Amino acid sequence: MKKIISTLLLFTAAILMNGCTASYQSEFMTPQTYMQNQASILIVTPENGRYETIEYPSSGIDVASTLAQELGKYSSKIATIPTPVTINDIGDDVLQQYNYVFIPQILHWEDRLTGWSMRPDRIQVRFDIYDNQRQLVNSYMVTGRSAYIVWVSKAPNSLLRRPIRDMLKTFFGQG
């Protein structure tokens, strides 16, 4: 009887431990591209994320502001364009003021109210990084899933900080 109870407790603990952690997958298109510290950086706010027919109105701003906060550790000159534009829409005079341009694109954004539904939030965001000559320097893809079991529901933007931090550590040659 003790063996059955201890096996059940071990099994329950394993399920809870796995269900209580977020998971991430991320990768660079070109793994060995490094930026200089204190580079001037322009961030383009992406279009808001969607899941089926639901648009998440602040998701684009969330991505841009999280990226700007994390980039603040590496540069003191960071600016944000508040609307979605392509690299070709940015004027030459603006572009020449910056070393790099980050253009995120939200590919998937799903808020599933995990606290009571036990369905994880999911995100997928691609960060295209250009130099001031409009050349694609690198691209970074982040895929994240929240835990299945959470005690307090969080928005999908809570899945951004860690993979963005990892991306920047690698991109600035510290990871």
Image (tube, rainbow, N blue to C red):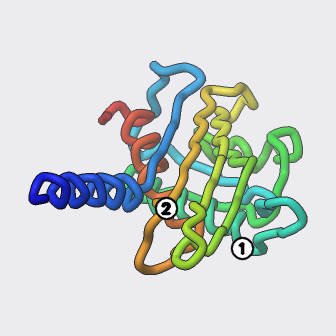
- Is 161 located above or below residue 31 in the figure? below
Q: Which of 13 and 84 is in front in this view?
A: 13
Q: Is mark 2 on a helix, strand or loop?
A: loop
Q: Please report the residue visible at 82 percent of the width from the left and 57 percent of the height from the top.
A: 84
Q: Please report the residue visible at 73 percent of the width from the left and 44 percent of the height from the top.
A: 95
Q: What element carries label 1?
A: loop
Q: Please report the residue visible at 69 percent of the width from the left and 48 percent of the height from the top.
A: 104
User: Horizontal placement of 88 versus 36: left or right?
Assistant: right
User: Horizontal placement of 50 versus 24: left or right?
Assistant: right
Q: Which mark is residue 148?
A: 2
What is the crowding at mark 2: few (fewer than 14 residues within 10 Å), some, or many (at least 20)?
A: many
Q: Where is residue 5 in the image (x, y as percent from the top left)?
A: 18, 60
The residue positioned farthest toward the left in the image shown: 2
Determine which residue is flagged by label 1: 58
What's the residue type where badge 1 is placed?
Answer: Ser
Q: Please report the residue visible at 78 percent of the width from the left and 74 percent of the height from the top.
A: 57
Q: Position of residue 46 (x, y in %)?
A: 75, 56
What is the crowding at mark 1: few (fewer than 14 residues within 10 Å), some, or many (at least 20)?
A: few
Q: Which of 15 and 34 is in front in this view?
A: 15
Q: Where is residue 118 in the image (x, y as percent from the top left)?
A: 55, 68
- Is 154 located above or below residue 87 in the figure? below
Point out the image quarter for the C terminus.
top left
What's the residue type where badge 2 is placed?
Answer: Tyr
